[in-house]
Image: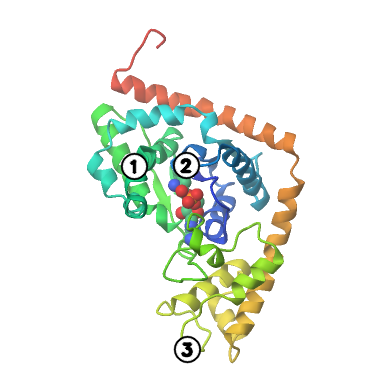
Amino acid sequence: MKRIFSGAQPTGNVHLGNYLGALRNWVALQRDYESFFCIVNLHAITAPQDPKMVAAKTRELARIYLAVGIDPNVSTVFVQSDVPAHAELTWLLNCVARVSELERMTQYKDKVRKHEENVSVGVFDYPVLMAADILLYQTDLVPVGEDQKQHLELTRDIAIRFNRDYGQTFVVPDPFIPKVGARIMSLADPAKKMSKSDEESEAGCIMLLDNDEAVRRKFKRAVTDSGTEIKFDESRPAINNLLTIYHLLTNKTPAEIEEQFKGKGYAALKQELADVCIEFLKPIQERIRSIDDDKLSQILEQGAERAEAIAQLTLNHAKKGLGLIGARS
Ligand code: TYM
């Protein structure tokens, strides 16, 4: 069986963009692949965090994975820092990745632009840790949103270089970026992607934990384009984004949706979107609350054990390739 690996950071709140661009596909693919879904808490600490929040958000994100439909009997769900091989392989790959490659990463460049001096070395090295995550599991496919595409290309380059220089060690993974939903935009600013880290964009971001009132308010205030017709049209990013969300939440075809809203205004669409979204979030929020804390600990413990066994094999292989043979090898 081929493998998939993916992860999300336990920072901020999980939003509809994360779900539609990534988590939804994890759920859809999990039975066709051997699947690993990681809560990447080592990535989360590349920016300063309140340690209590990191711990709480890590467990909350695990609950969200389960609540959206990741089945722990089918998929391996685990916390990144529980498997030390992630950090260890990162060091090995650091010695293969090039500074010039990391300097080209757009997410890194954006952070440097915004925070100038205060960017940690971890932010710079972030894509190498991500490569380690993926390569440890001999991953074939990585389901992610469009913003991770560049990191995936780097992962492939690192794997190819390592295999060339130190012998065949890693499967070279392919990204799985959905045709629709890979880049859900902010409701407040359709030129920006929906994002959990951007403080200003709260109003444009539907969180999976939002209550009904917040969902209604955010859709009601969603920015729209000029023109009144409700049509899928990439030259009108605001309406296109709202319709894409509606399409993904209802599974109705674009033609059906356009027919449904023919002659109706934006207000009708926004109201219908809010209704559909609230209905979609309700069972997820109920499941999040109903997951027993001990059960969750048990799932994460088993997940870490399963992940560790595979990760360790790859790590040993990579260490041997590099000549890192010690007294215990
Ligand atoms: P993170 O936590 O920012 O986001 C989790 C997933 O959500 C996708 N996503 C979006 N998709 C569509 N529209 C949006 N507006 C949107 N915003 C976010 C992301 O593309 C991602 O798939 N670096 C990763 C976490 C990571 C990872 C990995 C992923 C660490 N190691 C290994 C895959 C494999 C990140 O920060 O995702």
Query: Picture coordinates of residue 51 (x, y %)?
Result: 56, 37
Q: Which residue is mark 1?
A: 124
- Of 61 and 247, nearer the camera is 61
Residue 127 visible here: yes
Label 2 amino acid? Pro
Q: Which mark is residue 158?
A: none
Q: Compute the Cα span from label 3 to label 2.
A: 43 Å
Q: Are marks 1 and 2 in contact (CB under 8 Å)?
A: no
Task: Name the mark nearer the viewer: 3 or 2.
Answer: 2
Residue at the far front in the pictured view: 117
Callout 2: SS: loop
Q: Which residue is mark 3?
A: 227
Q: Which residue is rendered at x = 64% and y = 49% of the image?
A: 64
- Quarter-wise, where is residue 90 in the image? top left
Label 3 amino acid? Gly
Apparent side of residue 289 relative to residue 224 in the rendered image (left or right):
right
| Above or below, 60 relative to 277 | above
Q: Which residue is rendered at x = 55% and y = 75% of the image?
A: 222
Callout 3: SS: loop
Q: Which residue is rendered at x = 49% and y = 42% of the image?
A: 44
Label 1 amino acid? Phe
Which comes before the other along the chain, label 1 or label 3? 1
Apparent side of residue 267 relative to residue 319 in the rendered image (left or right):
right
Q: Which residue is mark 2?
A: 48
Q: Which residue is rendered at x = 51% and y = 56% of the image?
A: 196
